[in-house]
Each structure stands twice: as C-alpha cells, then as structure tokens.
Amino acid sequence: MHRGEHRRGAREEISRGPKTFRRGRAVTFLEQLTIKRTTIAQQLEQPEFQSIQQILIGELKALDMVINEFTQLFEIHADEIQGDEAKEQQNDEAN
C-alpha cells in the first residue's frame, strides 16, 4: 500500500458524514434555524413589521437557502427534526 492510498482512505472516512454526537448538534442547530424562520414568517404577517417587509422576505429566502444546504450537507431527514408543533404536542401530552 502506498502512502497516498492510505491518506485517501482517511479522507473518505472523514467525508462519509458527521459522527453521532456531532450529528445531534447539527440537528439541534437546524431546529434553531427553523425556529428563527418561523419567527420571521410570523413577523411578516404582523402590521407593525410592514415597513421592513422586504427585508423580512429577504431573510426568509436566505434562511431557506441555508436550511436546504445544511440539510443536504448533513443528510438530515425531516423525521430527525422535531419542529415547534411536535414539541408543543409532546408538552400537551405530558401535561
């Protein structure tokens, strides 16, 4: 085996995907991005934010792009993300 082959193998091992503990952090970060997106979408509907409506639309588009790229990069599936509605439902069931 040549040195280069060994190094390529190590690179392939790294590029296969994040480790489990890192994956949890990635999913948590994605959930935070989703919460920010929901907040901005709600602000878009409120009259007091009408003066900055175009800015909010731009932020929504940017967040959508980041969320999509992040989801693809880390190969995160929808069933791994616990959205606000699911969290609220779990809280309601617990009470």
Image (cartoon, grey):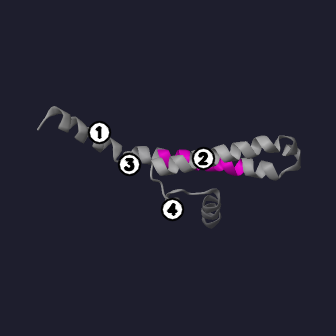
Left or right? Give the position of 78 relative to 55.
Answer: left
**Which marked residue is nearer to the observer: mark 1 or mark 4?**
1
Q: Which residue is mark 3?
A: 20
Q: Which residue is mark 2?
A: 65
- Residue 22 point in image, percent of width and height: 42, 43
* Disc nearer the start of the sequence (3/1): 1
**Which marked residue is nearer to the observer: mark 3 or mark 1?**
1
- Which quadrant of the figure contains the N terminus? top left
Badge 4 element: helix
Q: Give the Cα separation between the discs numbered 2 and 3.
A: 25 Å
At horizontal 29% and vertical 43% (from top left) the residue drawn is 12
* Disc nearer the start of the sequence (4/2): 2
Badge 3 element: helix
* Disc nearer the start of the sequence (2/3): 3
Left or right? Give the position of 68 relative to 46.
Answer: left
Q: Give the Cα separation between the discs numbered 3 and 1.
A: 18 Å
Q: How many residues crowd mark 1 within 10 Å: few (<14), some (14–19), many (20+)?
A: few
Is residue 38 within the magenta segment?
yes
**Which marked residue is nearer to the observer: mark 4 or mark 2?**
2
Q: Which residue is mark 4?
A: 79
Q: Amino acid at mark 2?
A: Met
- Residue 11 is tagged as 1
